[in-house]
Amino acid sequence: MVRLWQRLRGGELSPSRGGVSVALGLFVGLQPWYGLHLPLCLGLGWWLRIDAVVAYAAANISNPLLAPLIIFAEVELGSWLLTGRPAGFSIAAARRLGLEGWLVQGLVGALVLGAALATLGGLATFSLLAWRRRGRALRTAEIDGAIARTTERYRTGARADYWYVRIKLRTDPAVRALLALGGHFGEVVDAGCGRGQVGLALLEFGGVTKLCGFDWDASRVAAARIASGRPNDYTVGDLRQAEFPNCDTCLLLDVLHYLPVTDQDALLARAAKALNPGGRLLVRDVERRPNLGSWLTRLAEQIGTRLGANRGLLLRFRSRAELLASLKAAGLRGQVYAGSTGTPLQNLLVVAVRSDGPAGD
């Protein structure tokens, strides 16, 4: 069934494929072949290798609400083209034309109207999809630039830190997901900042007016200080006790699972309290689920902790429902995004806003 659906869609909806799909659907939908629109769209879409689903959606222009108006317009158009005068929907006109005359005028009008609207709809769809593709390409270039500039900040520090940050920023899908959120990040607090690369990437991307962070690993804080060029913005601090300054954006990335559940709840509550109205708490953490991706992610964290690559008291992983419930108890509304797209891992990225503030992007 999945393969059949993919075959009907025909692949990526490029501007040209989208334009042709909509044009075909509009043309078919405006023809008086009632009951045949679906098989025509599926058959022609399959044969032409365009998006048959989009084509049929466009064909639904001929719906019970619009069908009478479409028929009227087609008959009138056909009459103007064939006779140079309106059809005139009256008993006298019906007697004069007869059923055959009505059908001929309607068919001619349907062909012309279908061709015209198909052309306009196809061009409009092509333009819209091309505009969206250009926007995505521009956003991708902006993100790539921010990542490159952030990486360069670490070149003067320890080589190990430089290469770690370079690989992490280029391979971690959560970084791109955070940058793609857009909006105004404002004053940012990076709690459990590690080497500080994510906060600095946000700074390079734009929309950050102030950035500070803390972590309990002094060596990583030292790397963040060198990269930022503002040593006072990064301090050594314990997540369990640190007080958060007021902020517009708070980052809690890959840190919750190193704390007991009660400490996790207390941390989320303190972070929520520090948010300004409309502020966002951005959380990325391992999702506990009964699947292979979650098991691999938890195993990687356990190995990293045993080897000393990660410093934590213990490992406590939570399910999506548990995390969202904890955020709700802290007065936040959370929206879940994929935090490890393109990898075999199972992470969640949650964008949470204060319940008394506007919804996040």
Image (cartoon, grey):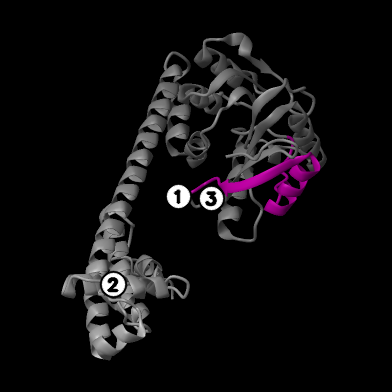
- Residue where numbered disc 1 is placed: 342
On residue 76, which mark appears?
2
On residue 352, which mark appears?
none
Q: Does residue 147 show up?
A: yes
Q: Quadrant of residue 268?
A: top right
The kind of residue tagged 3 is Leu
Mark 1 and mark 2 lie on one chain; the one further toward the N terminus is 2
Callout 2: helix, strand or loop? helix
Q: Position of residue 281 (x, y in %)?
A: 66, 34
In magenta segment, residue 287: no
Q: CA distance from mark 3 to mark 1?
A: 9 Å
Quarter containing the C terminus: top right
In magenta segment, residue 325: yes
22 is higher (above) or lower (below) than 155: below
Residue drawn at point x = 74 percent, y = 23 percent: 244
- Residue where numbered disc 3 is placed: 345
The kind of residue tagged 2 is Glu
Q: Which residues are magenta?
A: 313-342
Q: Answer left or right for 294 relative to 240.
A: left
2 is higher (above) or lower (below) than 164: below
Q: Position of residue 137 (x, y in %)?
A: 34, 39
The kind of residue tagged 1 is Gly
Closest to the camera, between mark 3 and mark 1, is 1
Q: CA distance from mark 1 to mark 2?
A: 55 Å
Q: Answer left or right for 320 relative to 98.
A: right
